[in-house]
Amino acid sequence: MVEAKYFVKVIDAGKPLRVKKEISEIVKNTVGGKMIQKMKKEYVDCPVAGKQVPFLECYLCVSFIRRVKGEVHCAGIEYKIRQE
């Protein structure tokens, strides 16, 4: 089990953020449609990338461990999209 190095708050943007089509397609295989719509309106201030990142990209990052009560547990390894 990987230890969490960062605990990052998930922030509601209010409006959907732009996400690459490939990322949406990968997430569609694991999560339901209503949940994806909600996730598209969220972002995190990523400590690894050093910028605001849409939650869908965070969800597919190699450093993503879990999301608990509006907080992401991040391993802090690197900011890179997992290839599934």
Image (cartoon, rainbow, N blue to C red):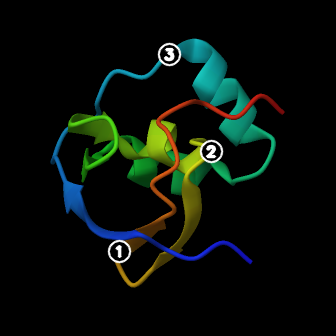
Assign a secondary structure to mark 1: strand
Task: Specify the amino acid type for callout 2.
Answer: Val
Residue behind mark 1: 71
- Mark 3 and mark 2 in contact? Answer it, CB < 8 Å: no
- How packed mark 2 is, by other alpha carbons closer than 10 Å (few <14, some 14-19, many 20 or more), is some
Task: Name the outermost residue toward the bottom.
Answer: 69
The image quadrant that residue 83 belongs to is top right
Front-most of 17 and 5? Answer: 5
Front-most of 55 and 75? Answer: 75
Residue name at image x 70 percent, y 26 percent: 25
Residue behind mark 3: 20
Assign a secondary structure to mark 2: loop
Q: Quick check: 51 left or right of 20?
A: left
Residue 62, numbered label: 2
2 up-or-down from 12: above or below: below
Assign a secondary structure to mark 3: loop
Q: CA distance from mark 2 to mark 1?
A: 17 Å
Task: Specify the amino acid type for callout 3.
Answer: Lys
62 up-or-down from 20: above or below: below
Count of number-bearing discs: 3
70 up-or-down from 39: above or below: below
Q: Position of residue 73 (x, y in %)?
A: 46, 71
